Amino acid sequence: MIKVLFFASLRQQLDTAEYQLQNFSGSVQDLRAHLAELFPSWEVHLQADNVQAAINQEMVTGNAAVADGDEVAFFPPVTGG
C-alpha cells in the first residue's frame, strides 16, 4: 500500500488530506497520472508545475520510483518570512 498525502492549498483544492493506493508501481509522475485518471478533477492541480513531491519525507523529482510501503506527499511551494 502507498499512502498519498496532500498539504496546504492542494489539500483544500482536492478536498482530501490522504488517499491510500494498493498495487501501484511506477514513478511519482506515473502516480500523478494515475490519480488524475481515478479523479479527473484532480488533474489540473496535481499536474501543475509548482506542485512538489516527497517520498518518505525526502524531496524527489518526477522520475523517482514509488515502492510499496512508501508515503508520498504532494504540496505547493511554501514561502516563509
Image: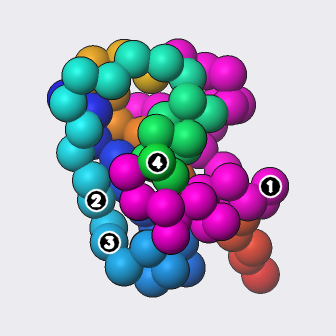
Quadrant containing the C terminus in the rendered view: bottom right
Give coordinates of residue 32: x percent, y percent. 54, 43
Q: Write the start and end of the magenta stretch as one range.
A: 38-65
Q: Is residue 55 magenta?
A: yes
Amino acid marked by disc 1: Asp
Q: Earlier in the sequence, mark 4 or mark 3?
A: 3
Residue with the mark numbered 3: 16
Residue with the mark numbered 4: 37
Mark 1 and mark 3 in contact? Answer it, CB < 8 Å.
no
Find numbered disc 1 in the image and state the secondary structure of the residue it sits on. loop
Q: Is residue 58 visible?
A: no
> Residue drawn at (45%, 82%), measured in percent from left and top?
12
Front-most of 18 and 41?
41
Q: CA distance from mark 2 to mark 3?
A: 6 Å
Front-most of 56 and 14?
14
Amino acid marked by disc 2: Glu
Residue with the mark numbered 1: 49
